[in-house]
Amino acid sequence: MLSREITLYCRHGLSISQARQLSRMAGLFKSHIQLSNLSRRQTAEASSLLALLTLATQPGDLCQLLIEGLDAELAHMAFNCWCVELGKPLGRSATAHLAEQRLATHQPDYHFALPQVASLSAPHAKAQVLAQLIGLLPESLVKESPGLHSELMAREQVSATIIRAGIAMPHVLSAAVRQPALAMLHSTEPVDWGSSLGAVHNIILLCAPRQLPPAQLRPLTRLARAMMDETLTHALLHASTHQARHAIVIEGLLS
C-alpha cells in the first residue's frame, strides 16, 4: 500500500475551521488519512471533525498526517498546503534546526543533532550496525570507540535490545563516553536483530556515562517508555525523512 506522511511542528492550535477543512478534504480521497498529535500521544481519523477536535492541538505540538492508499501521492500534494497553514512541516532546510532547539532548551546535556541520523545502504550484521552508530556520535564525546563497541555487543549477548517490532534500542552506561548521546540508523530493508519479534528498520543508540546521576538518566527512561507507545512508534515507522525521525525521537526524550 502506498504511504505518505507529513510531520510538522504546529504553529498554533488546530482551529474548528481548520479541522473542518481537513475533514472535508479527507472525504475527497480514497486513502485512509489520520492526524496524530505525537506530543499528546493521540490519533484521530481525518474524516471525523469531532475526533480531530479532541486532539487538543497546541502551539509547539509535534503532529503527523499519515496518508495510506492508492491515491496517497495525490492526497499528499493536496494536504501540503493545509499543513503549511497549521505549522512548520519537517523535511525542509528552514526547519532542520527546530528539533535540535527543543532538545537544547529542555535537555542541554544530551547530544542528538540531525547529522547523528543516517541510513543503512544495505542490511548488515549487528556488529557492523553498532559500529556505524558509534561512528555517528561526535568524536569529542567518545573516549574509546572499540571499548564502547565491545560493551554494546556484550549487552546484546545478554538479550537482543529490540523494544518492539521494527525498532531496536541498543543502550549502555559506559566510561567510554563523556556525556549522554544518541544516534540513529534507518534501513528500508529489514535488519536481523536476533529476536523472535522479527527484524528492525530503525535502530536507536543510547549511551551515557556510567556515573551519571539518576536524574539525568530520566530522559532515556522516558524515551524507552515512549517507544512502547503505539502512536509514537507508528509515526516513527512511517516517517519518511531523517528530520521527521529525529524530531519524533526527541519528542520521546522530552515528553
Image: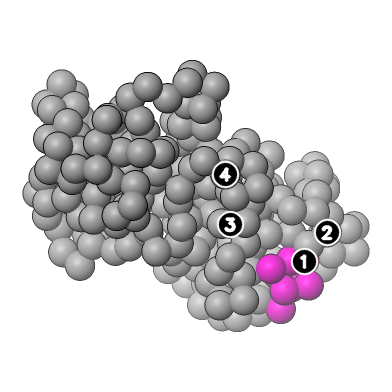
Give the residue number, with chain letter if any, for mark 1.
86
What stretch of residues is rendered in magenta?
Answer: 81-88
Give the residue number, with chain letter if any, for mark 4.
108
Instruction: Confirm whether the magenta stretch covers residue 122.
Output: no
- Marks 4 and 1, Cα distance to the nearest angstrom? 28 Å
- Marks 4 and 2, Cα distance to the nearest angstrom? 25 Å
Type of amino acid under label 4? Pro
- Marks 2 and 3, Cα distance to the nearest angstrom? 17 Å
Q: Nearer the viewer, residue 71 or 124?
A: 124
Q: Nearer the viewer, residue 195 or 255?
A: 255
Which quadrant: the N terminus? bottom left
Type of amino acid under label 1? Leu
The correct choice, above or below, for 197 with respect to 55 in the image is above
Q: Give coordinates of residue 221: x percent, y percent.
A: 47, 26
Select label 4 or label 1 by which is in front: 4
The residue positioned 41% from the left and 38% from the top of the image is 180
The residue positioned 12% from the left and 43% from the top of the image is 146
Question: Which numbered disc flags the more N-terminal residue, 4 or 2?
Answer: 2
Instruction: Confirm whether the magenta stretch covers residue 82.
Output: yes
Q: Which mark is residue 99?
A: 3
Give the residue number, with chain letter if any, for mark 2.
12
For residue 36, say whether it is visible: no
Q: Are marks 1 and 2 in contact (CB under 8 Å)?
A: yes
Q: Are marks 3 and 1 in contact (CB under 8 Å)?
A: no
- For the residue carrying disc 3, how many other residues have a C-alpha within 10 Å: few (<14), some (14-19), or many (20+)? many
For residue 121, say whether it is visible: yes
Q: Are marks 4 and 2 in contact (CB under 8 Å)?
A: no
